[in-house]
Image: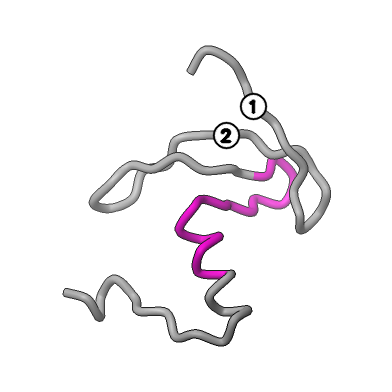
Amino acid sequence: MDKLLFMKCLRCRGAMIYDKFYGPHEQFWGWKCLICGEIVDPVILENRQLMRAGQVINSRRARR
């Protein structure tokens, strides 16, 4: 990545950095707070919106 991108953490108001994460089967980009460790990516944000709307979230394990 050519430049660092920052935003404020919604949990603690600390600085967040856009970073690459490595899961067991995939890589993804997301925001990580440098203070509290909160991680946010598009999947996490979508799941939080669904939870606020009272919808059921299918886990990845349930889809397999």
Pinpoint residue 23: horizontal percent, then vertical percent.
Answer: 33, 50
Magenta range is 33-48
Secondary structure under badge 1?
A: loop
For the point 33% across and 42% down, which residue is it? 27
> Mark 1 sits on what residue?
5
Q: Is residue 19 magenta?
A: no
Number of residues whose C-alpha sits closer than 10 Å to that of mark 2, classed few (under 14), some (14–19) or many (20 or more):
some
Q: Judge from the rendering whether residue 54 lies leftward or rightward of residue 28; answer left or right.
A: right
Q: Is residue 57 left or right of residue 61?
A: right
In percent of the image, x 59 and y 15: which residue is there?
Answer: 3
- Where is mark 2, residue-wise? 18
Circles 1 and 2, Cβ within 8 Å, touching? The answer is yes
Q: Find residue 54 and report its horizontal and vertical position in percent.
A: 57, 87
State the image coordinates of residue 40 (x, y, percent, origin top left). 57, 52
Residue 56: x, y in percent? 44, 86
The residue located at (64%, 50%) in the rendering is 37
Q: Residue furthest left?
A: 64
Which of these two is toward me, 14 or 7? 7
Name which of mark 1 and mark 2 comes first in the sequence. Answer: 1
